[in-house]
Image (spheres, grey):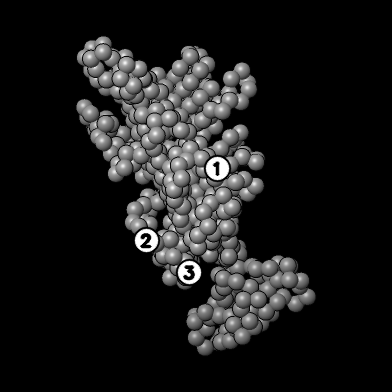
Amino acid sequence: MYIGKGMVPSYGGGISVDGNIDNGATQATVRLLTTDANNPAQIHFNTASHNGGGIYLKPCIGSSYLGRTTLCAFDFRIENNNSQEGTGIYADADHDTLNNAFLGGSIRLNSDSNNECSTPETIGTLGSATCTSGAACNTVSGNVAESGNLATPGSAILAQTDADLQADRRWFGPDPDTGLPRISNCLIADNTLSEQVIRVEDDGNGEGGTTIDGCTIVNNGNPGGQVIHSAHALTLTNSIIDQSGSDTLIYAGPGGGLNAGYVLATDTSTLPSAPDIIQGQPSYVDAGNQDYHLRPTSAGIDFAPANGGQDLDGNARDVDLAPIPNVFGPRDIGAYERQNMFQCGTSDSIFCNATNTPGDASGRLIIPATPGVNSTAQRPGCRHTARTSRGCRRPWPSCCSAFPRSRGWRRARGSSPTAPCAASAPCRTARRRNSACGSRPRRS
Protein backbone atom coordinates (compact mmCIF):
# COMPACT_ATOMS: atom_id res chain seq x y z
CA MET A 1 0.00 0.00 0.00
CA TYR A 2 1.27 3.46 -0.89
CA ILE A 3 -0.40 6.77 -0.16
CA GLY A 4 1.54 9.86 -1.07
CA LYS A 5 1.76 13.15 -2.92
CA GLY A 6 -1.95 13.84 -2.68
CA MET A 7 -3.82 17.12 -2.84
CA VAL A 8 -3.56 19.64 -0.01
CA PRO A 9 -6.60 19.40 2.29
CA SER A 10 -6.87 21.29 5.55
CA TYR A 11 -6.81 18.14 7.71
CA GLY A 12 -5.40 14.71 6.93
CA GLY A 13 -3.08 14.97 3.97
CA GLY A 14 -2.89 11.20 3.49
CA ILE A 15 -5.86 9.75 5.42
CA SER A 16 -8.67 11.50 7.31
CA VAL A 17 -10.99 9.52 9.62
CA ASP A 18 -14.23 11.29 10.59
CA GLY A 19 -16.31 10.10 13.54
CA ASN A 20 -19.38 12.13 12.54
CA ILE A 21 -21.28 8.93 11.71
CA ASP A 22 -24.90 9.02 10.59
CA ASN A 23 -25.56 5.33 9.97
CA GLY A 24 -25.93 4.19 13.58
CA ALA A 25 -22.32 2.97 13.85
CA THR A 26 -20.17 4.12 16.75
CA GLN A 27 -16.68 3.31 15.49
CA ALA A 28 -14.69 4.50 12.47
CA THR A 29 -11.48 2.50 12.14
CA VAL A 30 -8.74 2.52 9.52
CA ARG A 31 -6.45 -0.54 9.47
CA LEU A 32 -3.12 0.05 7.81
CA LEU A 33 -1.11 -3.11 7.08
CA THR A 34 1.06 -4.81 4.49
CA THR A 35 0.75 -8.22 2.84
CA ASP A 36 4.37 -8.07 1.60
CA ALA A 37 6.96 -8.61 4.34
CA ASN A 38 9.58 -6.68 2.35
CA ASN A 39 7.41 -3.62 1.69
CA PRO A 40 5.67 -1.97 4.66
CA ALA A 41 2.56 0.13 4.17
CA GLN A 42 3.63 3.72 3.55
CA ILE A 43 2.01 7.07 4.22
CA HIS A 44 4.48 9.66 3.01
CA PHE A 45 5.02 12.95 1.17
CA ASN A 46 1.55 14.24 2.06
CA THR A 47 0.65 17.78 3.11
CA ALA A 48 -2.20 19.28 5.12
CA SER A 49 -2.51 23.04 5.41
CA HIS A 50 -3.52 22.74 9.06
CA ASN A 51 -3.13 19.47 10.98
CA GLY A 52 -2.43 15.79 10.35
CA GLY A 53 -0.04 15.82 7.41
CA GLY A 54 -0.06 12.03 7.20
CA ILE A 55 -3.15 10.85 9.12
CA TYR A 56 -5.91 12.78 10.90
CA LEU A 57 -8.46 11.34 13.36
CA LYS A 58 -11.55 13.36 14.33
CA PRO A 59 -14.00 11.74 16.80
CA CYS A 60 -17.47 13.15 17.36
CA ILE A 61 -19.79 13.47 20.36
CA GLY A 62 -23.25 13.27 18.81
CA SER A 63 -26.61 13.92 20.39
CA SER A 64 -27.24 10.20 20.83
CA TYR A 65 -23.93 8.51 20.11
CA LEU A 66 -20.15 8.69 20.52
CA GLY A 67 -18.39 8.48 17.17
CA ARG A 68 -14.98 7.03 18.01
CA THR A 69 -12.05 7.06 15.58
CA THR A 70 -9.11 4.64 15.63
CA LEU A 71 -5.96 4.16 13.57
CA CYS A 72 -4.58 0.61 13.57
CA ALA A 73 -1.18 0.55 11.84
CA PHE A 74 0.94 -2.59 11.58
CA ASP A 75 4.34 -2.78 9.87
CA PHE A 76 4.27 0.70 8.44
CA ARG A 77 6.28 3.78 7.51
CA ILE A 78 4.88 7.26 8.12
CA GLU A 79 7.47 9.62 6.72
CA ASN A 80 8.12 13.01 5.14
CA ASN A 81 4.65 14.46 5.68
CA ASN A 82 4.02 18.15 6.29
CA SER A 83 1.52 20.18 8.34
CA GLN A 84 1.41 22.68 11.18
CA GLU A 85 0.72 20.15 13.95
CA GLY A 86 0.81 16.36 14.20
CA THR A 87 2.76 16.12 10.96
CA GLY A 88 2.77 12.32 10.99
CA ILE A 89 -0.39 11.57 12.98
CA TYR A 90 -2.88 13.92 14.61
CA ALA A 91 -5.47 12.46 17.00
CA ASP A 92 -7.98 15.23 17.59
CA ALA A 93 -10.71 15.44 20.25
CA ASP A 94 -14.31 16.58 20.39
CA HIS A 95 -15.69 18.56 23.33
CA ASP A 96 -19.20 18.43 24.69
CA THR A 97 -19.42 21.91 26.22
CA LEU A 98 -22.77 21.22 27.89
CA ASN A 99 -21.41 18.30 29.92
CA ASN A 100 -17.76 19.34 29.73
CA ALA A 101 -16.83 15.91 28.34
CA PHE A 102 -14.07 15.04 25.88
CA LEU A 103 -13.68 12.23 23.36
CA GLY A 104 -10.27 11.72 21.77
CA GLY A 105 -8.99 9.62 18.89
CA SER A 106 -7.05 6.39 19.41
CA ILE A 107 -3.73 5.46 17.78
CA ARG A 108 -2.52 1.85 17.75
CA LEU A 109 0.91 1.18 16.28
CA ASN A 110 1.68 -2.55 16.25
CA SER A 111 -0.56 -2.91 19.27
CA ASP A 112 -4.06 -4.22 19.84
CA SER A 113 -4.31 -4.80 23.57
CA ASN A 114 -8.01 -3.85 23.63
CA ASN A 115 -8.90 -5.80 20.45
CA GLU A 116 -10.02 -2.59 18.76
CA CYS A 117 -8.13 -3.59 15.62
CA SER A 118 -9.50 -7.15 15.46
CA THR A 119 -13.11 -6.28 14.66
CA PRO A 120 -14.85 -7.59 12.64
CA GLU A 121 -11.90 -9.82 11.72
CA THR A 122 -8.26 -10.10 12.79
CA ILE A 123 -5.51 -8.55 10.70
CA GLY A 124 -4.15 -12.06 10.12
CA THR A 125 -7.38 -12.91 8.36
CA LEU A 126 -6.77 -9.91 6.12
CA GLY A 127 -3.34 -11.31 5.17
CA SER A 128 -1.18 -9.03 7.30
CA ALA A 129 2.56 -9.80 7.05
CA THR A 130 5.29 -8.94 9.54
CA CYS A 131 8.24 -7.02 8.13
CA THR A 132 11.42 -8.97 7.51
CA SER A 133 14.43 -8.04 9.62
CA GLY A 134 16.10 -6.24 6.72
CA ALA A 135 13.15 -4.05 5.78
CA ALA A 136 12.96 -0.44 6.96
CA CYS A 137 9.78 -0.66 8.98
CA ASN A 138 7.77 0.86 11.85
CA THR A 139 9.16 4.36 11.49
CA VAL A 140 7.73 7.82 12.03
CA SER A 141 10.44 10.06 10.64
CA GLY A 142 11.22 12.99 8.39
CA ASN A 143 7.87 14.67 9.08
CA VAL A 144 8.06 18.48 9.12
CA ALA A 145 5.99 20.89 11.22
CA GLU A 146 5.78 24.21 9.44
CA SER A 147 3.45 26.84 8.06
CA GLY A 148 4.42 28.88 5.04
CA ASN A 149 7.98 27.51 5.24
CA LEU A 150 8.26 28.74 8.83
CA ALA A 151 8.77 26.23 11.65
CA THR A 152 5.87 25.78 14.07
CA PRO A 153 5.91 24.33 17.63
CA GLY A 154 4.32 21.21 16.11
CA SER A 155 5.06 17.55 16.66
CA ALA A 156 5.40 14.32 14.71
CA ILE A 157 2.54 12.72 16.67
CA LEU A 158 0.01 14.81 18.57
CA ALA A 159 -2.71 13.34 20.79
CA GLN A 160 -5.24 15.86 22.08
CA THR A 161 -7.27 15.65 25.31
CA ASP A 162 -8.59 12.14 26.00
CA ALA A 163 -6.75 10.80 22.92
CA ASP A 164 -4.30 7.96 23.46
CA LEU A 165 -1.55 6.14 21.67
CA GLN A 166 -0.26 2.59 22.11
CA ALA A 167 2.87 1.52 20.28
CA ASP A 168 4.06 -2.10 20.22
CA ARG A 169 5.58 -3.00 23.60
CA ARG A 170 5.66 0.62 24.75
CA TRP A 171 2.76 2.83 25.69
CA PHE A 172 2.31 6.49 24.78
CA GLY A 173 -1.29 6.51 25.97
CA PRO A 174 -3.09 5.54 29.15
CA ASP A 175 -1.36 2.98 31.31
CA PRO A 176 -3.68 -0.05 31.55
CA ASP A 177 -3.22 -0.13 35.32
CA THR A 178 -3.45 3.56 36.18
CA GLY A 179 -5.25 5.12 33.21
CA LEU A 180 -2.49 7.74 33.02
CA PRO A 181 -0.04 8.45 30.18
CA ARG A 182 2.97 6.16 30.06
CA ILE A 183 5.97 6.04 27.70
CA SER A 184 8.12 2.94 28.07
CA ASN A 185 10.88 1.08 26.23
CA CYS A 186 11.31 3.92 23.76
CA LEU A 187 14.10 5.51 21.75
CA ILE A 188 13.83 9.22 20.95
CA ALA A 189 16.91 10.17 18.96
CA ASP A 190 18.35 12.40 16.23
CA ASN A 191 15.44 14.84 15.97
CA THR A 192 15.82 18.55 15.24
CA LEU A 193 13.67 20.53 17.66
CA SER A 194 12.96 24.09 18.68
CA GLU A 195 11.27 23.16 21.95
CA GLN A 196 11.38 20.32 24.49
CA VAL A 197 11.72 16.68 23.44
CA ILE A 198 8.73 15.78 25.68
CA ARG A 199 6.27 18.39 26.94
CA VAL A 200 3.34 17.63 29.25
CA GLU A 201 0.90 20.52 29.53
CA ASP A 202 -1.50 21.31 32.35
CA ASP A 203 -5.02 21.01 30.91
CA GLY A 204 -6.50 22.63 33.99
CA ASN A 205 -8.55 19.70 35.25
CA GLY A 206 -6.20 18.97 38.15
CA GLU A 207 -5.71 15.38 37.06
CA GLY A 208 -2.86 13.61 35.38
CA GLY A 209 0.59 12.24 35.73
CA THR A 210 3.06 10.83 33.23
CA THR A 211 5.49 7.92 33.49
CA ILE A 212 8.64 7.64 31.38
CA ASP A 213 10.30 4.27 31.92
CA GLY A 214 13.05 2.39 30.09
CA CYS A 215 13.72 5.07 27.51
CA THR A 216 16.83 6.43 25.78
CA ILE A 217 16.67 10.10 24.78
CA VAL A 218 19.79 11.05 22.86
CA ASN A 219 21.22 13.41 20.28
CA ASN A 220 18.16 15.56 19.73
CA GLY A 221 19.03 19.04 18.53
CA ASN A 222 17.41 21.58 20.82
CA PRO A 223 20.32 23.80 21.89
CA GLY A 224 19.64 25.36 25.27
CA GLY A 225 16.18 23.81 25.59
CA GLN A 226 15.03 21.37 28.22
CA VAL A 227 14.67 17.69 27.44
CA ILE A 228 11.44 17.26 29.44
CA HIS A 229 8.92 19.85 30.59
CA SER A 230 6.13 18.61 32.84
CA ALA A 231 3.32 20.59 34.38
CA HIS A 232 1.82 17.39 35.84
CA ALA A 233 3.16 14.77 38.21
CA LEU A 234 6.07 12.89 36.61
CA THR A 235 7.78 9.55 37.15
CA LEU A 236 11.11 9.08 35.38
CA THR A 237 12.75 5.67 35.86
CA ASN A 238 15.23 3.25 34.28
CA SER A 239 16.15 5.76 31.59
CA ILE A 240 19.09 7.40 29.83
CA ILE A 241 18.94 11.14 29.09
CA ASP A 242 21.98 11.90 26.92
CA GLN A 243 21.55 15.51 25.83
CA SER A 244 24.76 17.47 26.37
CA GLY A 245 24.18 21.17 26.91
CA SER A 246 20.50 20.79 27.84
CA ASP A 247 18.76 20.68 31.19
CA THR A 248 17.15 17.30 31.73
CA LEU A 249 13.95 18.59 33.31
CA ILE A 250 11.81 21.60 34.02
CA TYR A 251 9.25 20.44 36.56
CA ALA A 252 6.22 22.67 37.12
CA GLY A 253 3.90 20.04 38.57
CA PRO A 254 2.47 19.68 42.06
CA GLY A 255 4.72 19.43 45.08
CA GLY A 256 5.72 15.88 45.83
CA GLY A 257 4.67 14.80 42.35
CA LEU A 258 8.18 14.19 40.97
CA ASN A 259 9.59 10.68 41.29
CA ALA A 260 12.89 9.75 39.64
CA GLY A 261 15.14 6.72 40.02
CA TYR A 262 17.74 4.65 38.18
CA VAL A 263 18.60 7.40 35.73
CA LEU A 264 21.83 8.11 33.85
CA ALA A 265 21.88 11.70 32.55
CA THR A 266 24.32 14.25 31.23
CA ASP A 267 22.58 16.80 33.47
CA THR A 268 21.46 15.82 36.96
CA SER A 269 21.22 19.32 38.44
CA THR A 270 17.50 19.46 37.58
CA LEU A 271 16.74 16.01 39.00
CA PRO A 272 16.34 14.93 42.63
CA SER A 273 19.54 14.06 44.43
CA ALA A 274 19.71 10.30 44.94
CA PRO A 275 22.35 7.52 44.77
CA ASP A 276 20.63 5.93 41.77
CA ILE A 277 20.63 9.15 39.70
CA ILE A 278 24.06 9.30 38.09
CA GLN A 279 25.64 11.99 35.98
CA GLY A 280 27.43 10.54 32.98
CA GLN A 281 27.27 9.46 29.38
CA PRO A 282 26.94 5.90 28.09
CA SER A 283 28.94 4.24 25.32
CA TYR A 284 26.88 3.14 22.33
CA VAL A 285 27.52 0.43 19.77
CA ASP A 286 27.55 2.91 16.87
CA ALA A 287 25.96 6.27 17.61
CA GLY A 288 27.25 7.65 14.31
CA ASN A 289 24.98 5.23 12.50
CA GLN A 290 22.14 5.64 15.01
CA ASP A 291 22.73 2.33 16.80
CA TYR A 292 22.04 3.19 20.44
CA HIS A 293 22.43 -0.28 21.94
CA LEU A 294 24.87 -0.09 24.83
CA ARG A 295 28.37 -1.52 24.69
CA PRO A 296 29.10 -4.33 27.14
CA THR A 297 31.13 -2.11 29.46
CA SER A 298 28.98 1.03 29.14
CA ALA A 299 27.48 2.87 32.05
CA GLY A 300 23.86 1.77 32.36
CA ILE A 301 24.55 -1.96 31.95
CA ASP A 302 23.28 -4.07 34.90
CA PHE A 303 22.19 -0.87 36.60
CA ALA A 304 18.68 -1.32 38.04
CA PRO A 305 16.65 -3.93 39.94
CA ALA A 306 14.91 -6.66 37.95
CA ASN A 307 11.34 -5.92 36.92
CA GLY A 308 10.57 -8.24 33.99
CA GLY A 309 9.18 -7.34 30.59
CA GLN A 310 10.75 -6.75 27.18
CA ASP A 311 12.96 -4.08 25.66
CA LEU A 312 12.46 -2.10 22.46
CA ASP A 313 13.75 -5.02 20.37
CA GLY A 314 11.32 -7.43 22.04
CA ASN A 315 14.12 -9.13 23.96
CA ALA A 316 13.86 -10.16 27.61
CA ARG A 317 14.81 -7.65 30.27
CA ASP A 318 16.94 -8.30 33.38
CA VAL A 319 19.75 -10.21 31.62
CA ASP A 320 22.64 -10.33 34.08
CA LEU A 321 26.01 -10.13 32.31
CA ALA A 322 28.27 -12.24 34.50
CA PRO A 323 31.52 -10.27 33.97
CA ILE A 324 29.82 -6.95 34.75
CA PRO A 325 29.23 -6.07 38.41
CA ASN A 326 25.66 -5.03 39.19
CA VAL A 327 25.17 -1.46 40.34
CA PHE A 328 21.66 -1.86 41.80
CA GLY A 329 20.57 -5.00 39.94
CA PRO A 330 20.77 -6.88 36.61
CA ARG A 331 18.49 -4.66 34.52
CA ASP A 332 19.98 -2.39 31.86
CA ILE A 333 18.49 1.08 31.72
CA GLY A 334 17.44 2.77 28.51
CA ALA A 335 15.61 1.32 25.51
CA TYR A 336 17.69 -1.82 25.04
CA GLU A 337 18.73 -4.78 27.20
CA ARG A 338 22.06 -6.27 26.24
CA GLN A 339 21.60 -10.02 25.86
CA ASN A 340 25.27 -11.06 26.15
CA MET A 341 28.80 -9.74 25.92
CA PHE A 342 28.70 -10.07 22.13
CA GLN A 343 26.26 -7.98 20.15
CA CYS A 344 25.79 -10.62 17.46
CA GLY A 345 23.66 -12.77 19.77
CA THR A 346 25.93 -15.76 20.32
CA SER A 347 27.97 -16.70 23.35
CA ASP A 348 31.04 -17.38 21.20
CA SER A 349 32.25 -14.28 19.40
CA ILE A 350 34.19 -16.19 16.76
CA PHE A 351 30.91 -16.96 14.99
CA CYS A 352 29.73 -13.38 14.71
CA ASN A 353 28.99 -12.43 11.14
CA ALA A 354 30.50 -9.02 10.59
CA THR A 355 33.72 -7.22 9.82
CA ASN A 356 34.48 -5.54 13.10
CA THR A 357 37.84 -5.72 14.82
CA PRO A 358 38.46 -6.81 18.43
CA GLY A 359 37.45 -4.28 21.03
CA ASP A 360 35.13 -2.40 18.69
CA ALA A 361 31.85 -0.88 19.78
CA SER A 362 29.84 -4.03 19.25
CA GLY A 363 32.07 -6.28 21.31
CA ARG A 364 32.39 -8.61 18.34
CA LEU A 365 35.52 -10.46 17.26
CA ILE A 366 35.98 -10.93 13.52
CA ILE A 367 39.25 -12.17 12.06
CA PRO A 368 39.48 -11.86 8.29
CA ALA A 369 41.58 -14.35 6.34
CA THR A 370 44.39 -13.16 4.06
CA PRO A 371 44.03 -14.44 0.49
CA GLY A 372 46.48 -17.28 -0.17
CA VAL A 373 47.34 -17.59 3.49
CA ASN A 374 45.97 -20.35 5.68
CA SER A 375 44.11 -18.94 8.70
CA THR A 376 46.16 -15.80 9.17
CA ALA A 377 45.19 -12.29 10.16
CA GLN A 378 47.00 -8.97 10.02
CA ARG A 379 47.16 -6.71 13.02
CA PRO A 380 49.00 -3.39 13.37
CA GLY A 381 52.72 -3.83 13.89
CA CYS A 382 52.96 -7.54 14.75
CA ARG A 383 52.58 -11.03 13.40
CA HIS A 384 51.64 -14.38 14.81
CA THR A 385 53.87 -17.42 14.46
CA ALA A 386 52.28 -20.01 16.75
CA ARG A 387 50.91 -23.27 15.37
CA THR A 388 47.66 -25.05 16.02
CA SER A 389 47.66 -28.66 17.15
CA ARG A 390 47.81 -29.66 13.48
CA GLY A 391 50.74 -27.42 12.78
CA CYS A 392 49.09 -24.61 10.79
CA ARG A 393 49.33 -20.99 11.75
CA ARG A 394 46.25 -19.47 13.31
CA PRO A 395 44.85 -15.99 13.97
CA TRP A 396 44.66 -14.52 17.44
CA PRO A 397 42.20 -11.91 18.73
CA SER A 398 44.65 -9.16 19.57
CA CYS A 399 48.16 -7.92 18.98
CA CYS A 400 51.58 -7.75 20.64
CA SER A 401 50.55 -5.72 23.66
CA ALA A 402 47.91 -8.27 24.65
CA PHE A 403 49.82 -11.44 23.74
CA PRO A 404 53.52 -11.68 24.66
CA ARG A 405 56.18 -13.46 22.68
CA SER A 406 55.74 -16.53 24.80
CA ARG A 407 52.38 -17.02 23.07
CA GLY A 408 53.82 -16.64 19.60
CA TRP A 409 53.40 -12.94 18.88
CA ARG A 410 56.27 -10.65 18.07
CA ARG A 411 56.64 -7.35 16.27
CA ALA A 412 57.63 -7.49 12.64
CA ARG A 413 61.29 -6.57 12.19
CA GLY A 414 61.75 -2.84 11.69
CA SER A 415 58.04 -2.01 11.93
CA SER A 416 56.49 0.84 13.87
CA PRO A 417 53.66 0.18 16.34
CA THR A 418 51.15 1.26 13.69
CA ALA A 419 52.70 -0.50 10.70
CA PRO A 420 50.78 -3.40 9.13
CA CYS A 421 51.73 -6.86 10.21
CA ALA A 422 53.56 -9.17 7.89
CA ALA A 423 51.25 -12.01 6.95
CA SER A 424 52.27 -15.44 8.09
CA ALA A 425 53.58 -17.70 5.35
CA PRO A 426 51.12 -20.24 3.98
CA CYS A 427 51.26 -23.80 5.23
CA ARG A 428 53.62 -25.83 3.18
CA THR A 429 54.29 -29.52 2.84
CA ALA A 430 57.32 -30.43 4.89
CA ARG A 431 59.02 -33.77 5.27
CA ARG A 432 58.72 -33.77 9.03
CA ARG A 433 56.96 -36.14 11.33
CA ASN A 434 53.19 -35.51 11.91
CA SER A 435 53.22 -31.95 10.69
CA ALA A 436 52.26 -30.08 7.57
CA CYS A 437 54.02 -26.94 8.67
CA GLY A 438 56.97 -28.17 10.68
CA SER A 439 57.32 -29.61 14.16
CA ARG A 440 57.90 -26.24 15.76
CA PRO A 441 56.65 -22.71 15.13
CA ARG A 442 58.52 -21.11 12.32
CA ARG A 443 59.80 -17.66 13.13
CA SER A 444 60.25 -15.35 10.18
Q: Residue furthest right?
A: 414
| Residue 71 percent across, percent down from the top left | 35, 28
Mark 3 nearby-residue class (10 Å; few <14, some 14–19, many ≥20): some
The mark that comes first in sequence, 2 or 3, is 2
> What is the three-letter code of the residue carrying label 1?
Ile
Give the residue at x 48% y 38%: 231
Q: Which mark is residue 177?
A: none
> What is the three-letter code of the residue carrying label 2?
Ala
Q: Are marks 2 and 3 in contact (CB under 8 Å)?
A: no
Q: Is residue 86 above or below residue 271?
A: above
Residue 147, quarter of picture: top right
Q: Which mark is residue 250?
A: 1
> What is the three-letter code of the residue carrying label 3?
Ile
| Residue 263 percent across, percent down from the top left | 49, 55
Q: Is residue 363 left or right of residue 316?
A: right
The residue nearer to you, when weighing 96 against 423, is 96
Q: Nearer the viewer, mark 3 or mark 1?
A: 1
The mark that comes first in sequence, 2 or 1, is 1
The mark that comes first in sequence, 3 or 1, is 1
| Residue 175 percent across, percent down from the top left | 33, 41
| Residue 22 percent across, percent down from the top left | 26, 11
Q: Is residue 235 above or below residue 320?
A: above
Residue pointed to by mark 3: 324
Residue pointed to by mark 2: 306
